[in-house]
Amino acid sequence: MRARAGEVVVESRLLGARDSAALEGADFPLELLRSGPEDSPLGHSVAAALAVTMEVPALVDVWQRSPAQALARLHSIAAHDFEPADALGRPRADDEVIDPLHVGAVPPAGELPGRLDALTHVLTRPTRAPAVLVAAVAHGELLALRPFRWGSGLVARASVRLVLASRGVDPDLLSVPEAGMLSLGRSSYVAALRAYQSGTPEGMTEWVRWNSSAIGFGAQRSR
């Protein structure tokens, strides 16, 4: 692994982008991604996913200090071709979202500031909780909130990488958690997320187990 770390890192970003975009419904062959996404709505979606995974390494330190700043930066990159400039990096002002996973209704826009502040508190306070648990909480809360009209899914999955890197589980960003998520299937993704949204102990447990499985598969995928 050490001998080919540079190659693995590049491959992780490509695979992660391809699989994250596929979870959004933009399935794109990896070989075409290597040569550059096409100039089409599908191609732009994949290019957005790739831009997000490419930006993650530069945001690890920012994430530790200010997760909100990192999330705003990721959304600005992801939604560059899809949203007006004044919407980039800003939480939605209404309840209209693009919902590729068909999760359903979103929390009212008025709840976003409080819930995002609460998430920031969880992510920045000292804790002995396992990093995988913290990653699951960030991932689940961002997907449940869908704080942006477009691109919340890409940003939520990037948060898993940021948590794992910043908490020392995968500091070199070699693994591909998105590959694990895609391997479990979109339907199981939505089912686990809805379990998280229920707020019950059983639902939270199901979501954490789902994320643990995805992250474990993603670590194997990098080898």
Image (cartoon, rainbow, N blue to C red):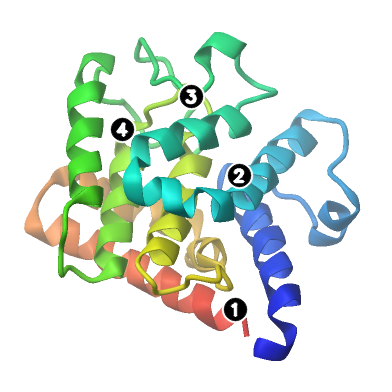
- The answer to whether any part of residue 26 appears in the image is no
Mark 1 belongs to which amino acid? Arg
User: Which quadrant of the figure contains the N terminus?
Assistant: bottom right
Q: Earlier in the sequence, mark 3 or mark 1?
A: 3
Task: Name which residue lies at 57% across and 56% down.
Answer: 57
Reply above or below: 127 against 25.
below
Task: Name which residue lies at 50% across and 25% down.
Answer: 98
Q: Which residue is disc 3 drawn over?
A: 89
Q: Which residue is disc 1 drawn over?
A: 221
Q: Earlier in the sequence, mark 2 or mark 1?
A: 2
Reply above or below: 120 against 79.
below
Q: Earlier in the sequence, mark 4 or mark 3?
A: 3
Q: Which residue is disc 4 drawn over?
A: 145
User: Which element carries disc 1, helix, strand or loop?
Assistant: helix
Mark-to-mark CA distance, 4 and 3: 15 Å
The numbered dot on residue 52 is 2
Mark 2 belongs to which amino acid? Val
Circle 2 packing at 10 Å, graded few (<14), some (14-19), many (20+), is many
Q: Quadrant of residue 176?
A: bottom right
Whether the residues at callouts 2 and 4 have beta carbons within 8 Å, the answer is no
- The answer to whether any part of residue 125 appears in the image is yes
User: Which quadrant of the figure contains the C terminus?
Assistant: bottom right
Q: Earlier in the sequence, mark 3 or mark 2?
A: 2
Task: Name which residue lies at 51% across and 78% down.
Answer: 219
Mark-to-mark CA distance, 1 and 4: 29 Å
Residue 8 picture location, percent across and down? 69, 75
Task: Name which residue lies at 44% across and 25% down.
Answer: 148
Is residue 40 rendered to the left or right of residue 80? right
Mark-to-mark CA distance, 3 and 2: 13 Å
Q: Quadrant of residue 111?
A: top left
